[in-house]
Image: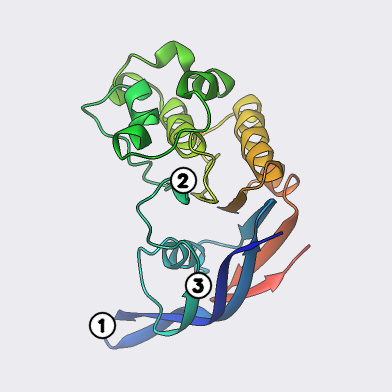
Amino acid sequence: MTIIVRLTDVTKRHHRGREVVTAVDHVSLELPSGSMIALAGPSGSGKTTLLNLIVGGDVPDEGAIDGPAGLADWSSLAIVPQALGLLPELTIGENVGFPLRLGARVATDPSEVMDRLGIGAVANRPPDETSLGEQQRAAVARALVTSPMLLVADEPTSHQDEANTDRVTAALADIAAAGSCVFVATHDNRVLSRCDLVLQMRDGVVTTRR
């Protein structure tokens, strides 16, 4: 087991006018390979801020983050953001295969990943001709094709019914079992039940729930 990312006493503050809000409050955390770890907590607890820090989208005010954060190589780091980030000028299939255009190593055939997630039939459609659930699964598939060292997902089942939640969760669990680290912010109990560890975040503080 290898530590993919290590956070040491990380703090991040936001300014709202004259008010200073501590979104992440002295968090120390290790994310090992071969694991699926959930981050649970109410809205506004700091989950998305913590994910942004881990992937290099923001920098801490205090503390240190060691790992692949901020790397452009999708073989090291893949992200499923809440905003999904699909390119409207590309088809669903082209979006899923987009890491190829960036020179990433593709570990799994994109068509195979799309079929597993139930979006093979819409591969030739642009995103705006598919459902929000299909778009979200395309964002998950795009992250899966490279079998990255670290996959960070923010509420990846928020637009899924029960059957498709099972598809997404099983696919994430499988790449964790194959050696990746999957770190997922979620409220979904079906996802939480499949994770090796559940962390609870409240008021910027992270504690172990299970």
For discs 1 and 2, the disc positioned in front in the rendered view: 2
Q: Which residue is mark 3?
A: 66
Label 1: state its secondary structure.
loop
Can you tell which quarter of the image residue 202 is in?
Answer: bottom right
Viewer-proximal residue among 43 and 92: 92
| Mark 3 vs 1: CB contact within 8 A | no
Residue 185, numbered circle: none
Distance between mark 2 and mark 3 Cα atoms: 17 Å
Q: Amino acid at mark 1?
A: Gly
Label 3: state its secondary structure.
strand
Residue 75, numbered circle: 2
The image shows residue 202, relative to residue 17, as above or below, that is: above
At horizontal 43% and vertical 68% (from top left) the residue drawn is: 53
Q: Amino acid at mark 3?
A: Asp
Q: Amino acid at mark 2?
A: Ser
Distance between mark 3 and mark 1 Cα atoms: 31 Å
| Mark 1 vs 2: CB contact within 8 A | no
At horizontal 43% and vertical 34% (from top left) the residue drawn is: 142
Of callouts 3 and 1, the N-terminal one: 1
Viewer-proximal residue among 177 and 106: 106
Disc 3: CA contacts within 10 A as few (<14), some (14-19) or many (>=20): few
Disc 2: CA contacts within 10 A as few (<14), some (14-19) or many (>=20): many
Label 2: state its secondary structure.
loop
Q: Which residue is mark 1?
A: 17
- The answer to whether 203 appears left or right of 69 in the picture is right
Of callouts 2 and 3, the N-terminal one: 3
